[in-house]
Image (spheres, grey):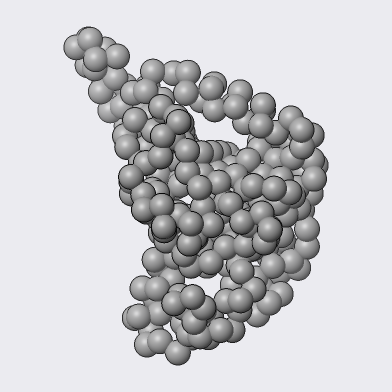
Amino acid sequence: MTTAAVDPGLLERGGVALDVDGPRATIWLSRPEALNAQTPATWEALRTIGEALSDEVRAVVVRGEGRAFSAGLDRRFFWAREVDGMPGIAGIAELPDGDADAVIAGFQAGFSWLRHPARVTVAAVQGHAIGAGFQLALACDLRVVADDVQFCMAEATLGIVPDLGGTHPLVHAVGYARAVEICLTGRRVGAEEAVACGLALRAVPVAELDAEVDALVSALLAPPPGAGAETHALLARVADGLDPAAALAAERAAQLRRLRSLAAGEG
């Protein structure tokens, strides 16, 4: 395994680890002693990883070390102006509108690249996935969960809103009504419900999570790279609201690109 060209100091500050093995990358939230609580440095590290991964990487797995995926935002940042040189909630609130918007947009960039159709992304989730942890799992294309998973969108109950890109994929995954109920009540969603409502692809015992994710990623990487990428991009555009006629046109264009590529011997 190798590591992409990302500053090791940045990864350490963000509590993130990265392994790259050919077409597969694995991102670990690596603060198990803090239940992988996230900080702005975590989001900076995630954004930098997204920028640094080579085109060879076609699948990304996101997971947490230890017994939790992520317990959400590090509590030190709640209502603090600054922690470890990074802005807390109170510090952001004091900024002019444009500056505050830019800061939050920078945080979101750590998550949004995970939905780019250039790669398929899988969240392997066990234990708590709360707040920012839930939103990080939602940023991925697919979620495989352990049977002890506890999803929770706690932001509204704390007086804030989910602002790391979680609202759009949550509504798409579970529907508007259930998303409203999950977000406003802040209740926990376990493995059985997560699968039943479309939030998770499947649930397995904790001991089987690694093998299940490995098998899924191998299957996702099985198609030729060009065909896989084109198909993923088609589905992503439909999920983003492409109308039926435009989807048909997109299919025709993608197929023509594939046929010409195959005719040219490019695979």
**Residue 183 location (% of width, % of height):** 68, 65
Give the residue drawn at x 67%, y 61%. 34
Q: Is residue 25 left or right of residue 227?
A: right
Q: Name the image quarter holding residue 86.
A: bottom left
Quadrant where the image shows the C terminus: top left
Give the residue drawn at x 64%, y 73%. 75
**Residue 126 location (% of width, % of height):** 71, 45
Q: Is residue 17 left or right of residue 243?
A: right
- Residue farthest to the left, as pictured: 264
Of 263 and 125, nearer the camera is 125
Give the residue drawn at x 45%, y 89%. 94
- Can I make out residue 105 in this image? yes
- Can I make out residue 239 in this image? no
**Residue 12 location (% of width, % of height):** 48, 57
Q: Name the image quarter holding residue 72.
A: bottom right
Q: How many marks?
A: 0
**Residue 63 location (% of width, % of height):** 60, 44
Of 190 and 90, nearer the camera is 90
Of 26 and 229, nearer the camera is 26
Q: Is residue 70 left or right of residue 20?
A: right
Q: Name the image quarter holding residue 203.
A: top right
On screen, 246 above or below 252? Answer: below
Of 233 and 137, nearer the camera is 137
On screen, 120 above or below 84? Answer: above
Quadrant where the image shows the N terminus: top left
On screen, 104 above or below 254? Answer: below
